[in-house]
């Protein structure tokens, strides 16, 4: 797992409005950080700058000791799970999960093995030949998670991945995600506006308010000294 450092990172989409004022924060290797805050406070923007889907307006992002703010997403060692799954609809579950490995030139034998391992971990072993349209919402989200972890990235980024699921499934997936994180140990950044998710998943919670870091501490410290 890789350390993530944000050093004086800022973001403006136009000259008049600053979405993120300069922020400095360091996320420890293997730590699960939940970024919490109301809609519009800049959570997604922050995550997308780490992923490389949005450019920083200023400052540096260092992942595993390497400055990445000018690198393309695929060279940053991050994998991202989106709220809307973003699966390839014409591909099977196995193909969805194996695709990035195939692009990276991983052999067929190893792809098969890694797909089988990840599918087992996520309870998808019986669904490998289905297409996303033949899956439930929870299964689709598991495929999206599988696709992200199959490359064993040092950094996992989650953009409200549970928001589209019903309450029971959200609960189950929270528990599963917490276990999964312990098993794979990537440095994880999870964006949500759901306090329960933050409490359940976070080693540390980063509370954003209009782009400012209002608090950055353990769930215990935050909820016992609000
Ligand atoms: P959150 O994830 O906390 O809901 P966002 O990071 O999506 O917040 O958005 C933060 C602010 O940036 C919002 O005011 C939003 O309108 C603005 N914003 C987001 N994306 C863009 C964009 N592509 N162009 C202009 N403004 C944007
Ligand atoms: P392709 O032949 O284009 O790689 P496949 O449909 O055979 O596509 O499978 C996609 C990927 O998923 C392959 O890389 C394969 O290794 C893996 N895969 C397919 N079926 C299974 C399975 N039942 N168990 C494990 N991995 C599988």
Image (cartoon, helix red, strand yellow):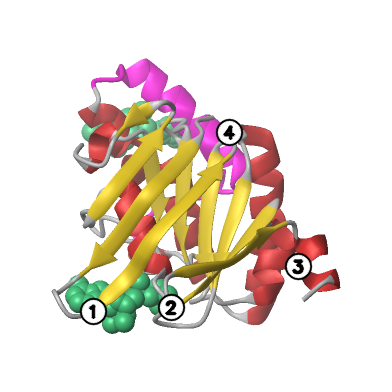
Label 3–label 2 contact, CB within 8 A:
no
Quadrant of the picture in which ligand 1 is shown: bottom left
Residue that appears at 28% across and 73% down: 18
Image disc number at residue 17: 1
Nearer the viewer's eye, disc 3 or disc 1? 1
Ligand 1 contact, mark 3 (Cβ < 8 Å):
no
Residue that appears at 55% across and 77% down: 193
Q: Does residue 52 appear left or right of residue 3 in this picture?
A: left
Query: Residues in magenta?
Result: 105-132
* CA–CA distance in space, label 2 to label 4: 27 Å
- Name the N-terminal-most of marks 3 and 2: 2
Magenta region includes residue 128: yes
Q: Of all residues shown, which one is farthest toward the left? A: 15
* CA–CA distance in space, label 1 to label 4: 33 Å
User: Toward the viewer: 211 or 135?
Assistant: 211
- Name the N-terminal-most of marks 2 and 4: 4
Q: Of all residues shown, which one is farthest toward the right? A: 224
For label 3, the residue is: 222
């Amino acid at each position: 797992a890789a350390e993530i450092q944000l050093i004086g990172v800022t973001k403006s989409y136009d000259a008049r409005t600053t979405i993120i004022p300069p922020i400095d924060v360091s996320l420890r290797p293997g730590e699960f950080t939940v970024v919490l805050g109301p809609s519009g406070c800049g959570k997604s923007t922050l995550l997308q700058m780490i992923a490389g889907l949005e450019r920083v307006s200023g400052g540096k992002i260092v992942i595993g000791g390497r400055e990445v703010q000018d690198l393309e997403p695929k060279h940053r060692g991050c994998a991202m799970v989106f709220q809307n799954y973003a699966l390839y609809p014409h591909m099977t579950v196995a193909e969805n999960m194996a695709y990035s490995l195939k692009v990276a030139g991983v052999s067929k034998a190893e792809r098969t093995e890694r797909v089988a391992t990840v599918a087992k971990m996520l309870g998808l072993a019986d669904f490998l030949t289905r297409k996303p349209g033949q899956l439930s919402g929870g299964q689709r989200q598991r495929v999206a998670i599988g696709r992200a972890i199959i490359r064993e990235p040092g950094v996992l980024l989650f953009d409200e991945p549970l928001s589209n699921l019903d309450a029971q499934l959200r609960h189950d997936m929270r528990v599963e995600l917490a276990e999964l994180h312990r098993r794979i140990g990537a440095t994880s950044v999870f964006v949500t506006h759901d306090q329960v998710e933050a409490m359940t998943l976070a080693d540390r919670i980063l509370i954003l308010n209009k782009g400012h870091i209002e608090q950055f501490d353990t769930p215990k410290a935050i909820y016992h000294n609000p």
